[in-house]
Image: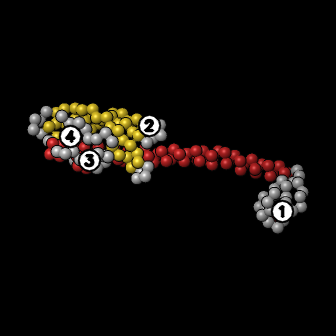
Amino acid sequence: MISFGSSCEDFPINYAFCADDKSRLKGEDAMRFFFVKAIEWTILIFLVFPWLMNCTSFLERGKLDSFEQTSKHYRLAILMSNFEQAIHLSALDFPKDPAYLKNFHVVSYTPKKIEFSSDKSKAYQTVEIEYYRIDSMRQKIIRDIQEWNYKPKSEQWVLTSGLPKFK
């Protein structure tokens, strides 16, 4: 045993086997020692281990919160028909003809389904977008399937499927 003090009396809790005099605790002291050890192990098993197991889910929760924030910013940019802002959340370049996108006005943006990969590094979101062309004033509805990838270095989600396909 490792001795932390000069004698057995220096220990805050008497151990079952004292390093100095090699004597064993007997009777009530031994029972108290094993009772304290049982409480320590119970605390370790029921408090520390679940906390350690939750560390990975805590990191995943951070990814999910980050996705929620990013998709919220993207949704607001699309709702305001601010496609330049929306493309900044994308891994793609801005379309060659940005004037084409100015012809569309988004009326509503409704998320329908979100699925994550098992390692939470990809998200697939299906949204329903109501919009109209300014020159024709015909309202249309499209279903946009978005693919988002998580970039661990920057800790950000990036849209890889591009902007909605307005017609």
Q: Nearer the viewer, residue 110 or 98?
A: 98
Q: How packed is label 1: few (under 14 Cα within 10 Å), some, or many (20 or more)?
A: some
Q: 10 Å neighbourhood of mark 4: few (<14), some, or many (≥20)?
A: some
Badge 2 density bin: few <14, some 14–19, many ≥20, Cα 10 Å: few
SS at mark 3 in the image? loop
User: Which amino acid type is shown beneath numbered disc 1?
Assistant: Cys
What residue would you read off at disc 3?
A: 93
Q: Please tell me which of labels 3 and 4 falls first in the chain.
A: 3
The residue shown at (16%, 33%) is 139
Residue 61 placement (x, y as % from top left): 47, 45
Q: How many marks?
A: 4
Please give left or right for residue 7 compared with residue 72 in the image. Answer: right
Disc 3 + disc 4, Cβ < 8 Å: no
Q: CA distance from mark 3 to mark 2?
A: 25 Å
* Rendered-image quadrant of the C terminus: top left
Q: For the residues carrying marks 1 and 3, which lies nearer the camera in this image?
A: 3
Q: Is residue 103 left or right of residue 51?
A: left
Q: Give the quarter of the image for residue 46.
A: top right
User: Of marks 3 and 2, which one's residue comes earlier in the chain?
Assistant: 3
| First along the sequence among labels 2 and 1 | 1
The secondary element bearing badge 2 is classed as: loop
Residue mark closest to the camera, 2 vs 4: 2
Tell me the quarter of the picture where residue 126 sits: top left
Circle 2: residue type:
Ser
Question: Which residue lies under the disc numbered 1?
Answer: 8
Tags 2 and 1 touching, CB below 8 Å: no
Q: According to the image, label 4 marks what residue?
A: 106
Residue type highlighted by circle 4: Val
